[in-house]
Amino acid sequence: MANEDSKPVIFCDFDGTITEIDVTDQLLSLLAHPSWREVEQEWMRGTIGSRECLERQMALVEATEEEFNALVDTIRVDPAFVPFHEYFRRRRIPIFILSDGFDSVIRRVLRRAGLGGRLAFRGRVFASALKWKHGRLKTRFPHASAGCRHGCATCKVAVMKKLGRSGFKILIGDGLSDRFAAEAADLVYAKGQLLAYSRDRGLKVRAFETFADVQADLEARLAVRRAHRKLAGRVLVTS
Ligand SMILES: [Mg+2]
Ligand SMILES: [Zn+2]
């Protein structure tokens, strides 16, 4: 665990965190055979990991690519995420998106929100992959980890360990797919099921509703960090 003086690295869930609703749930609710819910139950009970869950669920989608994209285009992001992203980009504090959801869907949603420009998230989205093949959806999981015990579609813990290194790891999330990542973070911003989970587990967690809340809290923390460093510098000089 890093302390607050280490450089912050922000890891952010996508579905239900950056977006107002869970994109994958929405796609499945409207476009998949209803048996997707039985698969979801197996995942909730912990019988299967999210990788197997998504693989089986996406195979149940009965739609054309046009219908699928039209639905993706109705998904809105938290309006406060745009200034949040800009604020940390200017301060060179990296934001990585970690998601069990799908890379192409995430990029399409971010582009519509005006976040696709300036190659904003190149190399910073860690998610599952989706491809149309003979009118059916095929999944691929380039960020599943061989060492992962949970069967994660995207092993958020593995990515955080690799990219967070000695940094102060901040996780922003909302759901059960973030629970293992929350345990690996130095500080968690949570809403929804993740908030209850993090509190139950005694993790260092703060509640949020929009990215404006997270930004305000982080700004205050960063100001304290700067003051500490200044003070430490002065002590060094005078001693
Ligand atoms: Mg989520
Ligand atoms: Zn994992």
Image: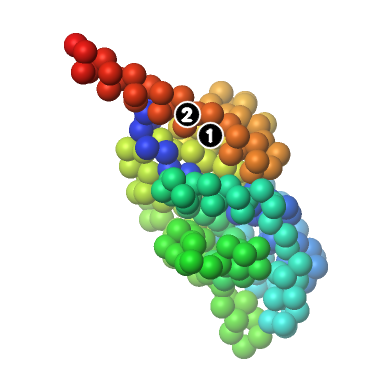
Residue 216 x/y as whole percent: 60, 34
Q: Which residue is rendered at x = 42% and y = 38% of the image?
A: 8
Instruction: Identify the image quadrant of residue 34.
Output: bottom right
Q: Which residue is rendered at x = 75% and y = 79% of the image?
A: 67
* CA–CA distance in space, label 2 to label 1: 6 Å
Residue 174 x/y as whole percent: 65, 43
Q: Secondary structure at mark 1?
A: helix
Q: Is residue 3 left or right of residue 205?
A: left
* Figure check: 65 above or below 198: below
Q: Secondary structure at mark 2?
A: helix
State yes or no: discs 2 and 1 in contact (Cβ < 8 Å). yes
Instruction: Identify the image quadrant of residue 232.
Output: top left
Residue 152 visible in rendering: no
Q: Give the crowd class for mark 1: few <14, some 14-19, many >=20 residues within 10 Å.
A: some
Q: Which residue is rendered at x = 45% and y = 58% of the image?
A: 124
Q: Give the crowd class for mark 2: few <14, some 14-19, many >=20 residues within 10 Å.
A: few
Residue 150 x/y as whole percent: 50, 48
Labelled disc at residue 125: none
Q: In what quadrant of the picture does the N terminus appear?
A: top left
* Figure check: 105 above or below 227: below
Q: In what quadrant of the picture does the C terminus appear?
A: top left
Q: Is residue 142 left or right of residue 56?
A: left
Between 160 and 206, the residue placed more toward the observer is 206
- Looking at mark 2, is its residue's CB closer than 8 Å to ligand 1? no
The residue that label 2 is drawn on is 223
Between 191 and 132, the residue placed more toward the observer is 191
The residue that label 1 is drawn on is 219
Q: Which residue is rendered at x = 50% and y = 32% of the image?
A: 187
Q: Amino acid at mark 1?
A: Glu
